[in-house]
Image: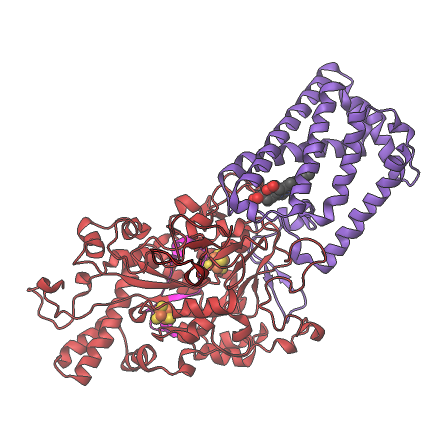
Amino acid sequence: MNAILFAYMPYVLLMTAIVGTIYRYTTNRFSWSSQSSQFLENRALFFGSFPWHYGIVLVLLGHIIGLLTPSSILAWNSAPLRLYILEVSGLALGLLALFGLLALAYRRLTNNRVKAMTTSWDVLLLIILLIQVATGIGNAILYRWGSNWYAATAVPWMWSVLTLNPNVEYVANLPLITKAHIFNAMLFIGLIPFTRLVHVFVINIYKYLWRPYQVVRWYHRDSQTENIIQYK
Amino acid sequence: MVMDIRAQLSMSFNLDKCIGCHTCSISCKNIWTTRQGAEYMWWNNVETKPGAGYPLTWEDQERYRGGWEVSDGNLRLKLIKGNKLRTLASIFFQPNLPTIDDYYEPFTYDYQNLFNAPAGDDQPVARPKSLITGEFMEKINLGPNWDDDFGGSPLYASNDPNLKGLSDSQKEMLTKFHKLFYFYVPRICNHCLNPACVASCPSGAIYKRGEDGIVLIDQDTCRAWRFCVSACPYKKPYYNWATGKSEKCIFCYPRTETGQPNACAHSCVGRIRTVGVILYDAERIEETAKLPDDKLVDGMRDIILDPFDPKVIEAAKKAGIDENWIAAAQNSPAYNLFKKWRISLPHHPEFRTVPMNFYVPPLSPILHQAKADRGGTFDPESTGFFNEIDKMRIPVKFLANLMSAGNERVVVESLKKQMAVRIYWRRKRVGDISESEVKKALDQTGLTLQDVEDIYRLNSLATYKERFVISETHRESKTTVDPRMMYEKRGTIGFGAKKKEFIGRQW
Ligand code: HEM
Ligand code: SF4
Ligand code: SF4
């Protein structure tokens, strides 16, 4: 069972995510959108979108840093005070995200206009994310110092998967909630190409942050895009 | 001096002649926006002035924060408060975004009920139904042209942001019943030289076309971050709530590329619209956009280049502008109205996007005859046949707020010139005005006889070919067009995929 969930499924879902995302990007780029619904409903979105995104983006960033440089997390945690700070802020961000997500889900299910533009994929995504955040918070509360044992269990497991040498040992003996959190995360990754989650991927960071103000496209010049006014 | 010559398609509107019939809006809608998610969009709309506009009070940038401001000598999007990173944070929720309730909830009527209702004591009615939710609407609060012709309405006209700075008696002329006077302002995207929509888009999806200056949103790159809707001070990009993409007026480029006028201009019943080419110096856009309010209109006239100047022609050829485009620029109604005769003005230049559509401010009603007891402004002290500029029904201040960032001088110049043309023709046709009065009018305004003849012709008799001087673009000869792609979107509007996805929603 562990082998299926943590040695085979990761590849199935990862491949779905990668192949599906590339397929969607190349064949139907028009559908690549955050599908914002602020235009239809403004007030509840404020209490949903802001907390949700600030919470989830930072927590996700923490997971990624842990994955890339587990030693940096361990080094930071070597002083108990810093460990507390990390754990408490992680939990706070998780709760923030949960609050936002609940607000988003409530809005999606109660506002008629938003409901009219809600697909089954949106609902499925919200359910998966709700499980993800709930199990994450459950972990943080029930099994303290997750940032420490994350570096010793899930991180090496993820690396073993990524290096095509899956070692289920690392996660086999984790508590049920933690396992659910990990497996659900993979479901979430597998969902990416089918839902609005593609909006998370910003293909060209340059355009977002450093690009000059104006964009001019030419049909008869070689460099087709040119800019005239610089950001100051 | 370095010059970076570019060509720009520009539309001009003669407001004296707009009858507010909305034919332009309908022809635009029929071609481009009869789709789900776009029903509420009017890429071309016609507003009653004074009035609240569409979306409601769009000119109020305290609320919407559209356009640019100069801060520490730099041009900055009004939307950016503090630094850019902080602005990017509002990607999750745009504090200044108008919502559907600022436009109107699109609706239809339950017509079937008129046919299918069971026999009863009452007439069956067709109740309104939302096109978003499909549910019945209690009542319609707002619709297209909701304040059409509501010149004196305290609900709409008195909320016009352009009434700022007018004296009470001036306001009365525009809003008091029996005295009031209103006019129409047709609006499309201005295809600005310093577009705030382009600058605000994080994903770089919006661009200005180098060849003709048309501003477009790349539908494949747009990610629904909605910054353009907030940043455009004219509220001309619209968010398509069904496809999750923003859309805007495309200046009918498939038509202009083949030398045809835009649908709105072509169908205009009042023949108030002209379309032409303008050559300008792109090097100086930034400096122009930074000018103080009272210099903006003159500055915009400055960066537009004389298409007959041999140096300009040579530089234009070097910049790759086709011969037929230079010829069009030499014959351009837009150039003549704005730069040569100086009678047209930009719309809200103080938004600093350097808009490229121009408006001839309205004179009407010019006749002095209407007696005060019949609702006119008859002034016993003045003996002239025509009304005097400062006694006109539309206060100059109001026009200046609308078209010259408050600069009354350029408005008066335009009105005086238009008046001079009328005085000249009154003398010629009816003869009850003295030669000396005509001479005085011409001398005062600096118009030549040729100018007067030409202005008269363009504004009244001009044929299709004189009103629309548009050269073909010959996209097929441009290197970057893949011939295999040329017909890909034939039979569609080009917005959205025509196929149904194998899974999920139809985009
Ligand atoms: C990294 C940068 C991100 C940006 C710029 C971003 C931006 C957005 C925007 C603009 C919306 C539309 C909100 C609206 O209706 O107006 C949205 C919705 C959403 N985002 Fe993100 N997002 C980001 C990251 C994420 C991440 C990491 C997740 C989840 C793991 C996520 C999950 C969602 C969900 C579920 C919605 C739909 C909310 C609803 O039900 O209306 N986003 N996002
Ligand atoms: S009017 Fe608005 S949408 Fe059009 S180019 Fe100017 S800033 Fe962009
Ligand atoms: S069609 Fe012409 S006259 Fe009629 S509303 Fe439009 S711009 Fe005015």
Residue that appears at 60% across and 37% down: A105
Q: Is residue B180 left or right of residue A221?
A: left
Residue that appears at 74% across and 14% down: A80
Q: Is residue B195 visible?
A: no
Please state the horizontal and vertical placement of residue B422, each as a whole percent of the image. 22, 76
Please state the horizontal and vertical placement of residue B154, each as a whole percent of the image. 25, 49
Q: Give the total number of marks visible in the rendering.
A: 0
Q: Is residue A66 above or below residue B378?
A: above
Q: Is residue B364 visible?
A: yes
Please state the horizontal and vertical placement of residue B218, each as a whole percent of the image. 60, 60
Q: Is residue B235 left or right of residue B93?
A: left
Q: Nearer the viewer, residue B13 or B30?
A: B30
The quarter of the picture where the C terminus of chain B appears is bottom right
Q: Nearer the viewer, residue B42 or B305?
A: B42
Per the image, is B354 magenta?
yes
Residue found at the very far top of the displayed protein: A80
Q: Is residue B168 above or below residue A61?
A: below
Q: Quadrant of residue B372?
A: bottom left
Which tint is chain B? red
Residue that appears at 51% across and 50% down: B133
Q: Is residue A149 left or right of residue B191?
A: right
Q: Is residue B396 above or below residue A148?
A: below
Q: Nearer the viewer, residue B356 or A25?
A: A25
Q: Quadrant of residue A52?
A: top right
Q: Please state the extent of the stretch shown in magenta in the rendering.
A: B336-358
Per the image, is B408 magenta?
no
Which tint is chain A? purple
